[in-house]
Image (cartoon, rainbow, N blue to C red):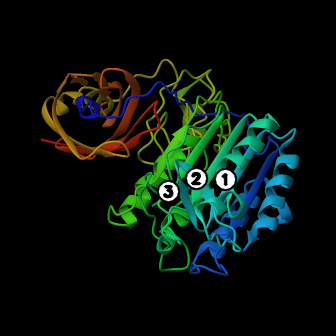
Amino acid sequence: MCRIFRTVLLSALLFLTIATPSARAENRVALVIGNAHYRFIPTLANPAADARLMAKTLKDLGFTLIGDGAQVDLDKAALDEAIRNFGVKLRGADVGLFYYAGHGLQVRGANYLVPTSANPARETDVDFELDDLSLVLRQMEAAGTRLNLVMLDACRNNPFGGRGFRAMSVGLAQMQAPEGTLISFATQPGNVALDGTDGNSPYTRALAQTVRKPGLGVFDVFNDVGVTVKKTTGGEQQPWVSSSPIDGRFYFAAPAKAVEPPPVSQSSPDSAKAQAAPGDPVGSTSLASSDAPAQDNPASAKPVQVATISPVQQMPLSQKPAATERKEERSVASYDGKWLSESTGSCISRLRARITVRNGIIYGQDGSGRISADGRVSGSFKSAGLIPGTFWGKMSSSSSGSGGWRNNLGCAGAWNLSR
C-alpha cells in the first residue's frame, strides 16, 4: 500500500490540522465574493449562486461575513474596498476565510481575480484592471489570525485569451501558502474547473455540504471535497490544496459531544440489566455508525467522545467477553496474504503495487500499517522515502477494501485493495 506514493512531488512543507475546543468559540470572519456578470467579457452562470450558497453556509457555522452576506458582481473599486474592509475586520479574529467564485487567471506565475469592470487593452494594464491574489494574502497575514483559509472557485478559461496577451496562462498557478494558511483550488494548477450545469459548481456544492459535517478536521474537509468533486465530474476535475504548517486543530462544525450515561452499578448482575437499554445485552456498545469501532472501557471510565460514537453502555471489569467476541478478536487472520493496492491522488497518476498482510500487520516498502479485526485500516508511510503521510480506510470484506491517504505536502487521494 505504501510504495504507491513514491512518485509524489517532494517538498519540505509540513501539514497539520488545527484544533479548537468548540467550533463556535473562535471569532471567525469571512469575505465571500461571486462575480458572474462581466461588462466586457463572457458572463458566468453560477458564481453568484455559488457565493450565496457559501455565505449562508458559513453564516450558519458562526462566521461573521463582510457586508453581512455574499458580495456579488464587484467592479475594481468595490473589490478593492471589500478586501480592505476584510483586512480591518480580521484584526483580533482567530480565523479568516476568503472565498471567490468568478473569472481568475495567472499572469507570469501570479494569480489574479477579475473584477466585473476589467477590460485590459495591454498586458501592462493587468496591474490596474485586475486584483492580485497576494493582496488578499497580505491582508490575512498582517491581521495575525491563527488560521487563514482561501477557497478559489476561479480556475476557468482565460477570458482575455483572444487579445494576444502572451503572459496570460490557463487556470491558476500553484502558489506557496503563507504561515498558518491553507489555499484550496477548485482544480489542479494550470487546469480549468467546470462551472456546473445545475445551479452551482461541483466544487462549491461539495464544499458547502462537507463543511457542515461535525468533527471533520480542516484537511479532512478538503480531502472529502476533492474525492466528491472527482467522482461527480467523472475525473475531469480534481481540487488541489496548498498549505503551510498549521498549529492545532480546527473544525468548521464541532464534533458531536457524547453524553455520559447513567452509572452502572456493579453490586449485582440484575442492577446492570436494569440500566441497559431495552433489547440490548448487558455491556454491549451502541454505535451511531456501524463503521465506528467499539470501545472496551473500564466501568469507572468516561465514554470516549468521538463524533461517530453515541454514548455507550460500560462493561463491568468482572464481566468477560462473550465467546463470539473472542472469536471476532481472532478473525484478523482472515486478511493475511498478498494484496494488490491501487492508488490515485492529487499529486500522482494511478499507481499499482503489491503489499503483504500478516497477523493484521501491513508491510510495504515505504511504510506499514494495521488491519483490525473489524476491518479498520490505518498506517503511515513516507512519500519517495522522505515526505511523511498517513492512510486509513475500511475492509468491506476479506477480499476488498478502500480508503484515503494524505501526506504532509498536502497531496491526498484514495486507495483500493483487492486479492
Q: Which residue is mark 1?
A: 132
Q: How far apart are the alpha carbons under marks 3 and 1?
A: 15 Å
- For the residue pair 169 and 15, the one nearer the viewer reads as 169
- Specify few, some or many for label 2: CA neighbours under 10 Å numbering under 14, 14-19, or 20 or more: many
Q: How far apart are the alpha carbons under marks 2 and 3?
A: 12 Å
**Where residue 64 appears, x then y in whole percent?**
82, 55
- Specify few, some or many for label 3: CA neighbours under 10 Å numbering under 14, 14-19, or 20 or more: few
Closer to the camera: disc 3 or disc 1? 3
Q: Which residue is mark 2?
A: 111
User: Which residue: 67% across, 35% down?
Assistant: 260
Specify whether 192 is left or right of 384: right
Q: Between disc 2 and disc 3, whose residue precedes?
A: 2
Q: How far apart are the alpha carbons under marks 1 and 2?
A: 6 Å
User: Which residue: 79% across, 34% down?
Assistant: 144
- Specify few, some or many for label 1: CA neighbours under 10 Å numbering under 14, 14-19, or 20 or more: many
Q: Given the image, on which type of amino acid does mark 2 rest?
A: Asn
**Where residue 413 appears, x then y in whole percent?**
37, 45
Q: Which residue is mark 3?
A: 167
Asked which quadrant contains residue 232, the reply is bottom left
